[in-house]
């Protein structure tokens, strides 16, 4: 299937796991905020543990919607135990099998629609990799249950794009208010405005802030 988004000269997406990119980001961010400098010195770069295919990453993002990390991990383990997390396999699972894993009826619908999009070629891994951040969002939000947060998780953890700022994520909000004294009572629009100083490396800041809240790396 041909991508609906023809590549242009400006469309050469950068990935944080490319050689030297993470170090370049850290150097660019140094000196902007003392709390951020402290956190960047404390945590190593991500290990970038592979989460599997694009489909698996998105299925895991759906699994994690509006529940705790621990609950999502438990749910994902039960889901994975059913067999390969692949579009055709998920498409063929029954409603009851997915409900027994602990998925709500709504999340079952989301997983089924995700499987339909990938198994029929409505969305392909190749076009997602070649697309800009905005184009990835346009492609994925055609799937039931994939909204901005899930798209942002995909951009950060799978495509490893450098300038994503998922401000709707409650963990990110909590970390910003915890580490930056001027943001303790700040509403979300002020968090967005403050983060402008970190362009074009807001994914790096996001990852460091998440890491400060959890003893293990966040993976999607």
Image (spheres, rainbow, N blue to C red):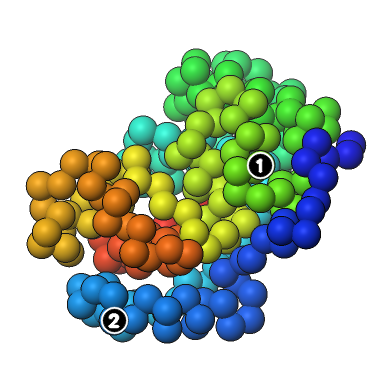
122 in relation to 176, above or below: above
Q: Which mark is residue 218?
A: none
In this rendering, the answer to whether 84 lies above or below 9 is: above
Is residue 204 visible to the viewer in this orientation of the structure? yes
Task: Work out whether residue 58 can be spotted.
Answer: no
User: 208 or 84: which is nearer to us?
Assistant: 208
Residue 120 in the image, given as x and y percentages of width and height: 83, 28
Residue 153 in the image: x percent, y percent? 50, 48
Alpha-carbon distance for marks 2 and 1? 33 Å
| The image quarter in which residue 158 lies | bottom right
Q: Earlier in the sequence, mark 2 or mark 1?
A: 2
Query: At 45% across and 20% down in the image, what residue appears?
Result: 104
Is residue 23 shown above or below 72?
A: below
Of the 4 image quadrants, the one containing the N terminus is top right
Instruction: Indicate whether 100 appears above or below 50.
Output: above
**Residue at image mark 2:** 31
Q: Secondary structure at mark 1?
A: helix
Residue closest to the eye, 32 or 19: 32
Query: Looking at the rendering, which quadrant does residue 160 occupy?
Result: bottom right
Q: Measured from the top left, where is residue 117 in percent x and y?
A: 74, 28
Percent across and percent down for residue 105 are 50, 16
Q: Residues within 10 Å of mark 1 (few under 14, many from 20)?
A: some
Badge 2: residue crowd in 10 Å (few <14, some 14–19, many ≥20): few
CB under 8 Å between discs 2 and 1: no
- Relative placement, left or right, of 37 versus 129 is left
Q: Label 1: which residue?
A: 135
Left or right of 104, for residue 108: right
């Amino acid at each position: 299937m041909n991508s609906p988004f023809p590549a242009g000269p400006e469309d050469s997406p950068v990935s944080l796991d490319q050689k030297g990119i993470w170090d370049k980001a850290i150097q660019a961010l140094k000196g902007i905020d003392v709390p951020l400098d402290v956190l960047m010195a404390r945590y190593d770069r991500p290990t970038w543990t592979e989460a599997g295919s694009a489909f698996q990453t998105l299925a895991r993002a759906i699994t994690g919607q509006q529940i705790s990390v621990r609950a999502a991990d438990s749910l994902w383990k039960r889901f994975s135990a059913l067999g390969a997390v692949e579009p055709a396999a998920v498409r063929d699972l029954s409603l009851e099998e997915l409900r027994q894993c602990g998925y709500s009826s709504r999340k079952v619908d989301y997983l089924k629609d995700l499987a339909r999009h990938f198994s029929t070629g409505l969305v392909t891994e190749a076009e997602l990799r070649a697309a800009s951040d905005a184009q990835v969002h346009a492609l994925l939000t055609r799937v039931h249950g994939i909204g901005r947060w899930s798209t942002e998780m995909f951009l950060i953890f799978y495509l490893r794009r450098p300038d994503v700022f998922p401000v709707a994520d409650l963990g990110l909000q909590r970390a910003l208010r915890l580490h930056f004294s001027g943001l303790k009572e700040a509403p979300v629009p002020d968090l967005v405005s403050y983060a402008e100083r970190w362009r074009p490396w807001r994914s790096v800041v996001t990852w460091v802030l998440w890491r400060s809240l959890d003893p293990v790396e966040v993976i999607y």
